[in-house]
Image: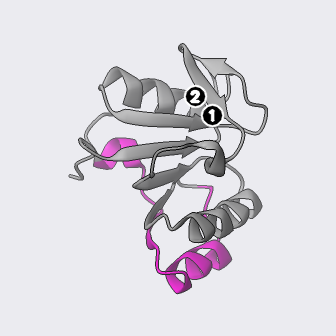
Amino acid sequence: MILLKGKKIAVVGVSNNEKKFGHKIFRDLLKNNLDVKAVGSKGGVIFGEKIYSKLNEIKEKIDIVVTVVPPMATEKIVEECIELGIKEIWMQPGSESQRAIEMAKNGGIKVTSHLCIMVQSGIW
């Protein structure tokens, strides 16, 4: 089981659509009192928290980025993580691509893919 307490987490792919996994993951990380930021292309507010439109808008240093977006978008997120010096990325099932995984590893980022962070952390 992975431990998320004490880590700053950014979930990329958050929206106000309750049926989307980005929404559910962000909601449940918040419910578990974790330090989590929402990132979604449309911005806005969710559960009283700002939805940032890009990772670089977040002022705090992020420890883990969780992607809940299509694989091509994950590749762009990996580029942003490399630029920002983020050292860990968790690609939720369906958001990964072999190219994104290789880009992240080549950029010195620890990658987890093909596993659900919510299941591995024991939240779901």
State how the image is colored. Answer: one colour
Q: Give the left or right position of residue 38, taking residue 97 as reference.
A: left
Mark 1 vs 2, N-terminal side: 1
According to the picture, the residue beneath numbered tag 1 turns out to be 14
Q: Position of residue 80 (x, y in %)?
A: 65, 63
Q: Nearer the viewer, residue 101 or 114?
A: 101
Q: CA distance from mark 1 to mark 2?
A: 5 Å
What is the three-letter code of the residue carrying label 1?
A: Val
Magenta-tinted stretch:
94-120
What is the three-letter code of the residue carrying label 2?
A: His
Please check the rendered image and state whether residue 118 is part of the magenta-colored stretch, yes or no. yes
Identify the image quadrant of the C terminus: top left
The quadrant in which residue 18 appears is top right
Q: Position of residue 35 (x, y in %)?
A: 36, 35
Q: Residue furthest bottom?
A: 106
Which secondary structure, mark 2? helix
Residue 48 sits above or below residue 79 on the image: above
- Asked if the residue under mark 2 is in contact with the one under mark 1, i.e. CB atoms within 8 Å, the reply is yes
| 10 Å crowding of disc 2: few (<14), some (14-19), many (20+) | many
Q: Nearer the viewer, residue 84 or 22?
A: 84
Q: Give the left or right position of residue 112, taking residue 92 as reference.
A: left
Can you tell which mark lies on residue 23? 2
Residue 102 sits above or below residue 82 on the image: below
